[in-house]
Image: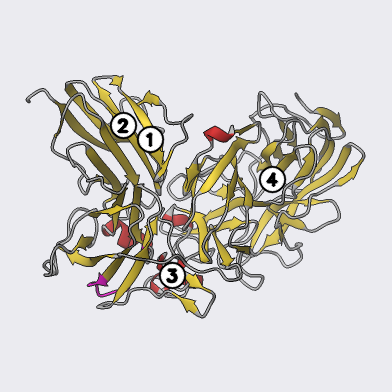
Amino acid sequence: MHPQLVVGSAVIALAFGITGGPAGRPARRPAAALPEVRPNDNRAAAGVRHSDTLTLRLAISMATWHPETPSGPGITVAAFSEEGKPPEVPAPLIRVPTGTWIVATVRNALADSAVTVYGLATHPAAALDSILLRPGDSATVRFPAGAPGTYLYWARLGAHVYGTGPGTGDEEREQLGGAFVVDRPGPVAPDRIFVLNIWGHVLDSANYSNALTINGRSWPYDERIAATVGDTLRWRIVNASNRRHPMHLHGFFYRVDSRGDARADTTYQPGARELVVTDQMRPFSTLAATWSPDRPGDWVFHCHIAFHVMASDARLDPLPPGSHDMMSDDPRLHMAGLVLGIVVAPRPRWQPPARKDVRRLRLLIQQGTRRGRSERALGYVLQQGAAEPAADSISIPGSVLVLTRGQPTDITVVNHLRERSAVHWHGIELESWSDGVAGWSGMDSTHVAPSIQPGDSFVAHLSLPRAGTFMYHTHMNDLEQLTAGLYGAIVVLEPGRRFDPATDHVFVTGWDGPGFAPPRVLVNGDSVSAPMELRPGVAHRIRLVNIGPANAWVYSIRQDTTTQRWRAVAKDGADLPAALATERPARALLGVGETSDFEWRPAPGSYRLTVARPAARPGEPPAYERRLIVGTGR
């Protein structure tokens, strides 16, 4: 349903396209006379509600935004505000019960830029309506809110074309976005809303200035989420940016209840709700999730794209060459950007479960002979037997750790590098102390885990309550150490089962070196692999792991031009509900930090496993290809 328009001096266009002059580039340092942006924690809804009608008066004007700390660097941006109130990032929260009519007036107070506003319409909407406002114009729209769900609205400046940062030829102006929530009738369960906004500015050919924020602040200046063991946390995540964000929760799974965007929201039936530790959010999309912590400690929820959380890339003032922040034990220094801290308190008389019959392993962090594009070659090597392997022996990816569900396992990680490191056991439900975020993981500020110093070791305690496919990787100096090889797969089996490499196949995707253009993709440590021979007529478990610093990839199996079929089994190590464990085309999109398992029963023949860009052009070769020969004798 299109909104009803009440036109004053505004020029209205219900279309995607816009006209008008380009927005002026924001100044690096703001003018002192501008109002200050207030971070919006999305706890209070905007507007005034009378009976079944919400009246909302919004303006877009220039303001000064300090996305880190009030005394830190500031930028001049266009921002939404309610008339008569301070400007906000994210934009003011629109939240109403279904059945509400909304009367929204939007005024463009910018002197030199048209704006186009999206998302102020009835849900679901067949198309993405828009309102074009030239400088000084205003317009009023009247519409019913529509179906319950999590949506968003935002504005685009002038003829701005959304970029995705360095190398795109464009900058990012995605601070003009906010949440639009329509609640079901009756009492509303407590929840929290978190909106991701991005502002970006090219400083020169090598440096990009970022404001990457959750509810208007960047780590470590954003909110700390307090919870208690046993609480039910209901979150609505709104990606108001033009980037994909694989949102990863440390230590716990969260249940995906719905996904949406500015037009519509799909609530999944109870039997079709995935459990995930990482969910890749599309640009301008929404997510509703539920989770419950069963262990106390300090945890993080963050985007798994390294450039969105590293101190070297996710600050307004990029780090100078040689900065030690990336190697600091202080989490306020080695992380930045899209990171949310969670502090879970124990319940009275809470005790950790007893750990009996502990299995003990020894994992070495080593440096070997340089290979490929990376300046160094680093790797995790699992010690076999009493003697340590040679000091320069490495494996890229690291040794596959085959563990058993329910068997407590202690892994002593020995650092043979000349720099500190840390290991995150990604997707594993474990104690906070062992989670691997230096200076943060643990319990309150008096008992936090350090990084692993050169020549020192750290014992990680894994409880392993779930069988599945997981990963482990560095959580220190992420970009350099990760692209040099510090990552690997974890396979947790049911008790009594053995790992059979003839039918159990792990494909781990990483990068060879930190370069952008384009990244050189490695699968199981190589960019070109010898053909793999498989037995026909039996079930093969295909375990896919994506742990590069960025980029989603499409994995597929084809015979000539025909895509094969496989059965989906698990996501992030959690078995899929029966409604989702279905046969489907052998094509899967994995974001960074995601794993997926499939069962494939091939007939004799020759096949190709490929890894390709999601938006690959026709005829563009895949980033990786491997021939699979099934029972042909060739």
**Above or below, 117 relative to 601:** below
Residue picked out by circle 2: 599
Magenta stretch: give its range. 414-423
Residue under label 3 = 433
Q: Nearer the viewer, residue 1 or 428?
A: 428
Residue sitting at the far right? 50
* Comes first in the chain, label 2 or label 3: 3
* Lower position in the chain sequence, tag 4 or tag 3: 4
Q: CA distance from mark 2 to mark 3?
A: 35 Å
**N-terminal-most mark, 1 or 2:** 1
Instruction: Give the Cα distance between marks 4 and 1.
Output: 34 Å
Tell whether label 2 touches label 1 (CB within 8 Å): yes
Please, what secondary structure does the residue beneath circle 1 have?
strand
Above/below status of 584 relative to 545: above
Neighbours of disc 1 within 10 Å: few (<14), some (14-19), many (20+) = many
Instruction: Examine the rendered structure and indicate whether residue 539 appears above or below residue 571.
Output: above
User: Residue 179 got which mark?
Assistant: 4
Query: How far apart are the two marked residues, 3 and 1, measured between alpha carbons?
Result: 31 Å
